[in-house]
């Protein structure tokens, strides 16, 4: 299997190019999710920073006071509202980000290219193409009302496999109200990684070889805590979820429902301040 020598992605966001540029650069520490696998040194990382202007640095910060940081890249193009580019300092990759006006906002396009002679196995900078959608899109959509604090993702992520992950994601979003990060792929499109967030916990949908065998007992049941259990139950039932166990109380209040591919989900009442 030949390793990729380039990566690209494009998304449309509902703000003007100047605002999109500011969101991508000045606010990178707010949209770049803090997880154990999104830093080069997760044990020490405290922030992501972009120093403005040509020659500025893209940094993974380890200590704010001392300035201890890993230089991820050097800015080679700084044209606010139009074009940003850097050469990676951690792998042999050039990254360009273009901001193009559209009728409803801005088309943001990332192009990352391995330099001639570079090692195709060392392409961590390609992550900017992979995180444009969902992370950047999600941040731009909520930046006017979201707290200006970095989002810390929990240490546990749940992965559920579906024969038709796009169909399942659309159903889970509608029936169970899970919060999708980024754009939902079109039917038939290579879904890859579809990520929901429940609070600060990721729920990831990945392709399966096929549906659960008929009559097979589910072996894993995700638990989700919701603000209003009764309203959630009524909505899920109306949306077509098969109720495996109705609302019950065993020291907590909850219910269990089955999704369209036979996976079971338990929903329980959250504390008001949770």
Image (cartoon, rainbow, N blue to C red):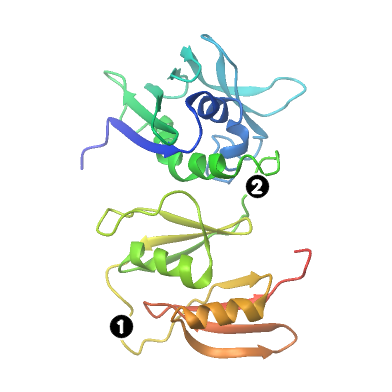
Quadrant of the drawing holding the N terminus:
top left
**Mark 2 to mark 1: distance in Å?**
37 Å
Quadrant of the drawing holding the C terminus:
bottom right
The residue lying at 32 percent from left, 33 percent from top is 7
Picture quadrant of residue 226 = bottom right
Position in image of residue 77 (x %, y %): 45, 12
Picture quadrant of residue 253 = bottom right
The residue lying at 50 percent from left, 87 percent from top is 243
Q: Residue furthest left?
A: 1
Judging by the rendered image, the residue that carries numbered circle 1 is 213
Q: Could you tell me if residue 207 is visible in this image?
A: no
Q: Residue furthest top?
A: 55
Neighbour class for label 2 at 10 Å: few (<14), some, many (≥20)? some
Residue 106 higher or lower than 76, as above or below: below
Residue 248 higher or lower than 204, as above or below: below
Q: Which mark is residue 152?
A: 2
Viewer-nearest residue: 121 or 236: 236
Position in image of residue 109 (x %, y %): 37, 30
Q: Earlier in the sequence, mark 2 or mark 1?
A: 2
Q: Secondary structure at mark 1?
A: loop
Q: Secondary structure at mark 2?
A: loop
Neighbour class for label 1 at 10 Å: few (<14), some, many (≥20)? few
The residue lying at 70 percent from left, 89 percent from top is 249
């Amino acid at each position: 299997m030949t390793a990729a020598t380039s990566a690209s992605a494009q998304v449309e966001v509902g703000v003007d190019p100047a605002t999109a540029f500011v969101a991508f650069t000045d606010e990178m520490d707010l949209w770049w999710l803090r997880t154990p696998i999104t830093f080069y040194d997760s044990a020490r990382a405290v922030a992501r920073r972009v120093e403005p202007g040509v020659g500025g640095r893209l940094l993974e910060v380890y200590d704010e006071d001392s300035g201890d940081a890993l230089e991820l890249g050097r800015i080679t193009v700084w044209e606010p509202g139009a074009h940003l580019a850097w050469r990676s300092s951690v792998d042999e990759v050039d990254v360009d980000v273009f901001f193009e006006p559209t009728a409803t906002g801005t088309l943001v396009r990332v192009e990352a290219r391995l330099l001639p002679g570079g090692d195709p196995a060392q392409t961590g900078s390609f992550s900017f193409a992979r995180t444009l959608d969902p992370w950047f899109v999600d941040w731009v959509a909520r930046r006017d009302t979201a707290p200006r604090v970095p989002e810390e993702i929990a240490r546990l992520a749940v992965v559920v496999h579906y024969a038709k992950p796009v169909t399942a994601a659309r159903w889970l979003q509608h029936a169970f109200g899970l919060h999708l990060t980024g754009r939902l792929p079109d039917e038939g499109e290579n879904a890859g990684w579809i990520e929901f967030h429940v609070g600060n916990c990721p729920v990831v949908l990945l392709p399966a070889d096929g549906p659960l065998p008929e009559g097979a007992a589910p072996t894993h049941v995700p638990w989700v805590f919701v603000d209003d259990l009764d309203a959630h139950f009524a909505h899920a039932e109306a949306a077509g979820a098969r109720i495996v166990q109705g609302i019950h109380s065993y020291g907590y209040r909850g219910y269990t429902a089955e999704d369209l591919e036979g996976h079971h989900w338990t929903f329980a009442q959250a504390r008001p301040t949770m």
